[in-house]
Amino acid sequence: MDSKFHGHLPPLKRFRFMQQQQEEEDRAVASSILPAKKRKESRDPPLAVSATSTTYSLPAKKRVWAVQPDFFAHEPVSPPLDLNVEYKPPPAFAEETEAVKEDNDGDDVVGVDDDDDGIVCAICQSTDGDPSDPIVFCDGCDLMVHATCYGNPLVKAIPDDDWFCSQCLVSSSEAKKHGKSSSCCCLCPIKGGALKPTVDGRWAHIVCALLVPEVFFADAEGREGIDCSKVPKKRWEDKCYVCKSRSGCAVECSEPKCPLAFHVTCGLKEDLCIEYREGRKKDAIVAGFCKNHTELWEKQQQTGKFKIVAREERKK
């Protein structure tokens, strides 16, 4: 196309025509550089990709069994999530979750049992222990006691070697004659526990000697030489309303006009209130209540208007 033809066109069309002509010349130069085969392919328009035709790089035999993927499924792969609706797992998944939870709960229970090692002082029923007052084990009967609760010889020094309680130190001849299992507290019908000999040749629980008012120790600090000679006859004759036995020594309820009495060990097992207080003249004050009056005393203690005093002081 010559310059005359260019002159008859409007300026804008003439500029576009010249620009198109220049692009065709540049394309012709670029295609001339390519080989003849590729030069022809570059002039042909690209073939439209068919959505239905798919090529596979599989052998002919396996290509027959290949399943063509469904890219145009009407249903989504996973249902849409609605964050405003509560998620409910399938029944099978829920059952599996419950089974796993039960297994974990069982593990937790085992863990609690592991933490509770069963180390309890046989006298004060406390699990607390520290280096200054440890819980010591008897190597003969596995008795567990605080050093201060048991007294001698533990209050003097904790042995580095084996330690045996008073009952385990009984001579072999006496053990064969009476039998260790037959040793029983003279103040209650309970066998075993933290026992020490009395001055009259019997055995008594340290806790019974502490909480029966008329019983005292010849050596209070070492808690040895238990003396029961001051116990009135009525205590030996009273029947324990808990175990229904007249064996041993029963402590009556401290509530006036209450006829009930009980052994110290029976009362402790029933969680009855038994309190030990030091008197003004280094005398011991012991107060014990039956079940009903224990509940009443606990309510009265919350008011702070009541206290335990000796009966002689109360009469004044």
Image: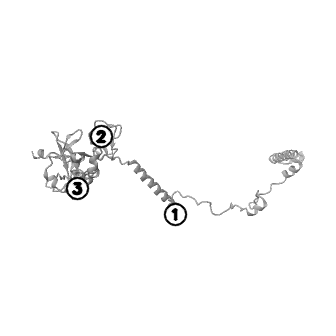
The three-letter amino acid code for the residue at tag 2 is Ala
- Percent across and percent down for residue 282 are 17, 39
- Percent across and percent down for residue 229 are 15, 46
| Residue 90 shows in the view | no
- State the residue at coordinates (75%, 61%): 62
Residue at the extreme top of the image, as rendered: 156
What separation in Å lies between label 2 and label 1 (alpha carbons)?
59 Å
**Residue under label 1:** 91
Q: Is residue 113 left or right of residue 300?
A: right
- Percent across and percent down for residue 274 are 22, 49
Give the structural element (helix, strand or loop) at label 2: helix
What separation in Å lies between label 1 and label 3 (alpha carbons)?
51 Å
The three-letter amino acid code for the residue at tag 1 is Pro
**Residue under label 3:** 291
| Residue 157 shows in the view | yes
Q: Is residue 162 above or below residue 248?
A: above
- Percent across and percent down for residue 6 are 86, 46
Q: Is residue 195 above or below residue 81?
A: above
Q: Dot 1, how many residues are within 10 Å of its Cα: few (below 14), some (14-19), or many (20+)?
A: few
**Closest to the observer, 293 or 134:** 134
What separation in Å lies between label 2 and label 3 (alpha carbons)?
31 Å
Q: Dot 2, how many residues are within 10 Å of its Cα: few (below 14), some (14-19), or many (20+)?
A: many
**Residue under label 2:** 147
Quarter occupied by residue 165: top left
* Residue contact between numbered discs 1 and 3, judged by CB atoms under 8 Å: no
Give the structural element (helix, strand or loop) at label 3: helix
The three-letter amino acid code for the residue at tag 3 is Lys
